[in-house]
Amino acid sequence: MTAVVFDLDGTLVDSAPDLHAAALAMLAADGLSPITFAQTRSFIGNGVPTLVARIMAAVGLPEDPDRHADMVAGFLRSYNAAPAELTTLYPGALRALQQLEALGCPMALCTNKPEAPARAILASFGLSRFLPVVIGGDTLTVKKPDPAPLRAALDRLGVEGCLYVGDSEVDAATAQASGQPFALYSGGYRKSPVAQIPHQHLFDHFKALPGIVETALRLPAA
């Protein structure tokens, strides 16, 4: 049996508003100038430590491992307190998960977001039952695009292969490194044109995903 594994930020949910709110709180606590929503959105994809490092560079702070660690901790305090207050589920995502469940398709989440807020977001939208396996950015010692997180998700599902669904260059590289086919959601946080991101399948609305999965995994119709 093959499975579908999802990225979270920019794929199932638009989490940029809550990430931006946490960034503003972190900067304000240090008496630093705010950054724009567009800046925050462009920094998403490689996990919280990289997000914070990009924010520090954007406000002109020099590289400083100790200060970076303090700011990561401050960001997470703010973010973990309300990870789904402003976040929204992409249109059709819940219905697509319901249809995939009806097809008997095992599903999991593989994200660079820390596992605790990832699980909190799934719970807030009623998605936990569809995605019982969650590999976060702090579940292992490495993050995407290293193939280990996606492989860990497959191991926990007890399957050898999957269709990986994501929205970014990081997700495409993860799928390639893992030897898995990739379905690109074009409405997320990618920084490059679609044509420059390797993918086997492409969709701009979740209503198309169940059909893609049936074709890619050759699942019987529900």
Image: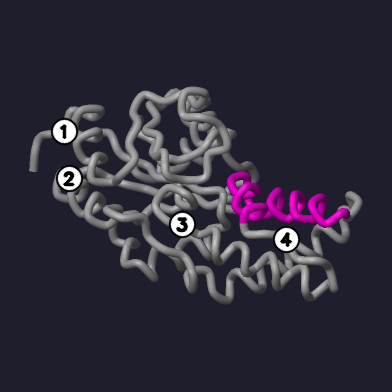
Tag 1 and tag 2, C-beta contact below 8 Å: yes
Q: Secondary structure at mark 4?
A: loop
Query: Which residue is under mark 2?
Result: 104
Q: Which residues are magenta?
A: 38-60
Question: Measuring 65% from the left and 48% from the top, which residue is drawn there?
Answer: 43
7 shown above or below 14: above
User: Within the magenta stretch, is there residue 57?
Assistant: yes
In primary-sequence order, the first of circles 2 and 3 is 3
Q: Position of residue 61 (x, y in %)?
A: 88, 55
The earlier-in-sequence mark between 2 and 4 is: 4
| Lower position in the chain sequence, tag 1 or tag 3 | 3
Residue 76, image x, y percentages? 66, 67
Residue type, label 3: Asp
- Three-letter amino acid code of the residue under disc 2: Gly
Dot 2, how many residues are within 10 Å of its Cα: few (below 14), some (14-19), or many (20+)? some
Residue 119 or residue 194, whichever sits in front:
194
Quarter occupied by residue 155: top left
Dot 3: element: strand
